[in-house]
Image (spheres, helix red, strand yellow):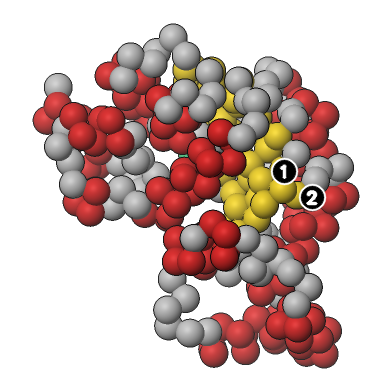
Amino acid sequence: MEDEMIEELRNFNSYVWLPTRVETQLQIKTEDFKQDRFGARSRLNLIRNTLSGLKVGKVVDLAGHSGYFSLELLDAGTVSESVVYDINDEVLRFGERLAMRMDLQDAIKFVKKDLRLDNIADLPDADLALCLNLIHHAGTLFDRDAVATLGWGKYATQYLSVLRTKYRYAIVGVGFKSRHPASWPVFKPLRPLYFCDIIAKSGWRLIYDANIYDLATFGEEEASGLRTRRSARIRLAQLMSAIVGHRASNAVYDRFRKPHASKLNKYHIFILS
Ligand SMILES: C[S@@+](CC[C@H](N)C(=O)[O-])C[C@H]1O[C@@H](n2cnc3c(N)ncnc32)[C@H](O)[C@@H]1O
């Protein structure tokens, strides 16, 4: 059983992380399985710390893969129930086995669902919607027509507005990459800032935001709002974007980006209430 699980883990893509308890049981070394890939640990710590100060019982975990975040939050007693949705059956089944192993099977459900703008209103009520690294795929993996028609900015505003009507809190992870989000012509360094406008337009209040590279490198306090403050740097970027246009300025930006600009730099997390 244990060998089987490790073997399966080896074959999965990068988004399977083992909850710490299972990692310890299987005597897995974090580095062996890239257990901290995409800043998973930093994201989890931030989420756990934030939620421990709030009263959150039920969670819906959108595109939650094999439920890493939900399982860890349940295991720590930070939340009491979670429903994990994903389109990929295989990773959901792996999540179910992780839950059994942790004796959490009564607190978590894994449900196969093709999440789209027109069906998220049907999701069950809960206190918190976790929506980590899903919506930047809209326009490429799903909801292609909606994004092509609305543009990603309006699409994301509508998506978050629906979540606003159903949940008290939302934690949204977004990747601001070269081709994602599609149909959103915004100069790269300004994307987190523009996303803050989307948050405000959809009726949410921003409690915390950070770039994942900053979070992993500087810690929660220092990383907070570092890329979204209307600081001199941001104003300069806005000016550059306005003068040369977002396409040209993205090309210039890419050429001069520092080599340390790791993959984590592309990801941002926003905590909303
Ligand atoms: C980048 S992974 C993010 C996983 C996890 N939330 C995290 O942040 O580590 C994206 C996930 O979205 C799922 N997915 C993609 N399109 C989906 C859709 N239309 N409905 C539900 N899940 C979807 C994929 O199967 C995958 O598990």
Q: Is residue 178 visible?
A: yes
Q: Which mark is residue 272?
A: 1
Q: Position of residue 128 (x, y in %)?
A: 65, 29
Q: Amino acid at mark 1?
A: Leu
Q: Amino acid at mark 2?
A: Ile
Q: Which residue is mark 2?
A: 199
Q: Secondary structure at mark 2?
A: helix
Q: Is residue 207 left or right of residue 18?
A: right
Height in image: 51 above or below 125? below
Q: Is residue 268 left or right of residue 29?
A: right
Determine which quarter of the picture holds residue 189. Answer: bottom right
Q: Residue at x 28, y 30 (%)?
A: 21
Q: Residue at x 68, y 18 (%)?
A: 124
The local crowd at label 1, few if under 14, some if 14 to 19, many if 20 or more residues have their Cα within 10 Å, is many
Q: Secondary structure at mark 1?
A: strand
Height in image: 163 above or below 34? above
Height in image: 71 above or below 29? above
Q: Position of residue 86 (x, y in %)?
A: 51, 31
**Mark 1 and mark 2 residues within 8 Å of each other at the beta carbon:** yes
Earlier sequence position, callout 1 versus callout 2: 2
Question: Of circles 1 and 2, which is in front?
Answer: 1
Q: Residue furthest top?
A: 106
The C terminus - image quarter: top right
Determine which quarter of the picture holds residue 52. Answer: top right
- Choose between 169 and 134: the one closer to the eye: 169
Q: Is residue 195 left or right of residue 93?
A: right
Q: Position of residue 162 (x, y in %)?
A: 80, 33
- Choose between 248 and 222: the one closer to the eye: 222
Label 1 – label 2 distance at C-alpha: 8 Å
Q: Residue furthest left?
A: 3
Q: Residue at x 75, y 49 (%)?
A: 206
Q: Residue at x 77, y 57 (%)?
A: 196
